[in-house]
Image (tube, rainbow, N blue to C red):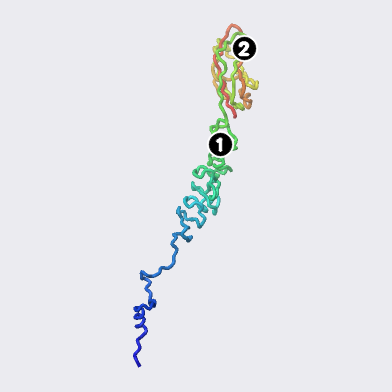
Amino acid sequence: MPARTPIFFALPLLASCGLGLAPYATDSASPDAVPDQEDRSGSDSGGPDCLDEDGDGFDDCSGDCDDDDPTTHPGAAERDSELACMRDGDGDGWGDAAAVPPIVAGTDCDDASLALQQDDGDGDGVSTCEGDCDDADPTRAPGTAETPFDGIDSDCDGEDGGAIIVTSGVGGLPIGDNATVSSPADVSGCGTVQSVEVIVDISHSYQGDLAVELRSASVVSATLHDRSGGSTDDLVGTYATTGGSLTPVDSLYVFTNEPGNGTWSLEIEDRAIFDNGTLNSWTLTLYCMD
């Protein structure tokens, strides 16, 4: 009986004869090896269209509504929404109120400034977005009552709650014996009077002849001088609601809370003979509530 050739010697021979038999072994390190299928997108979300272009950790496939802006993505404005795709340009946790679709609008009135936001730092119920001019001071916010002329803008309107109106009356008027001189001064821009100052400059050779009165536009009057001073010359100085170099006979508080607008006047009466004088000038200053 003839000898038989072992099959494992025959297989290489058959392959070399071009019979198309596949190699009986595969080397995984061979350059002809077929690589395993893998994700080549560069994104955890998968797919060639799911790139994170702005590097904020979100791509189009995971809901980034503006993949060119790293401040815009789902949860960016977590204080408005932990899920919505919003822009938080200033990093305060509040979304841009001016954003347009597909970006969801938030509540931050100025997304470029940390000074304007929805926080209420002083607990007065008003945020800087709502007009609080000092969010560290609970006594200052829109709607707070003003104290005029205290140097504090309590209601955040840019003013101290009052207006100072200065006006001058007609001067250069002669004061004859037993005669009365009236000098008008017009006032505008004064809603309600809080306090008054009157500066007078009167030349006269005998103070004891003179009576001087201030009259408001609402015809409220206060006597400033009433024939005191005897033979002292001239009457020069300031009468005021508080302070002043001269002391009025009547308190000038009588003008407080009176309307300020209109024509005020200084009335000067010489009640004796022999001596006369001149009203050189007078100035009225009103501290007013708007």
Q: How far separated are the C-alphas under marks 2 and 1?
A: 48 Å
Is residue 24 visible in this depiction of the protein?
A: no
Q: Are marks 2 and 1 in contact (CB under 8 Å)?
A: no
Residue 83 appears in the figure: yes
Q: Give the labeled residue for mark 1.
A: 156
Packing grade of label 2 (10 A; few <14, some 14-19, many >=20) is some
As helix, strand or loop, the secondary structure at mark 2 comes to strand
Q: Amino acid at mark 1?
A: Cys
Nearer to me, 17 or 211: 17
Above/below status of 185 relative to 97: above
User: Residue 77 got which mark?
Assistant: none
Residue 264 is left or right of residue 57, and the answer is right
Q: Earlier in the sequence, mark 2 or mark 1?
A: 1
Residue topped by disc 2 = 180
Q: Residue at x 56, y 17 (%)?
A: 282
Farthest residue toward the right? Answer: 219
Quarter holding residue 171: top right
Viewer-proximal residue among 209 and 167: 167
Residue 108 in the image, given as x and y percentages of width and height? 54, 45
Q: Position of residue 45 (x, y in %)?
A: 48, 60
- The secondary structure type at the circle numbered 1 is loop
The quadrant the C terminus occupies is: top right
Amino acid marked by disc 2: Thr
Query: What x and y, as percent, mark residue 172?
Result: 55, 13
Residue 24 position within the rendered picture, expressed as x and y whole percent measured from the top left: 38, 78
Question: Compared to 158, does 226 lie above or below?
Answer: above
Q: In the displayed structure, would residue 247 be above or below residue 136?
A: above
Which residue is at a point 47% across and 53% down the rendered structure image?
A: 56
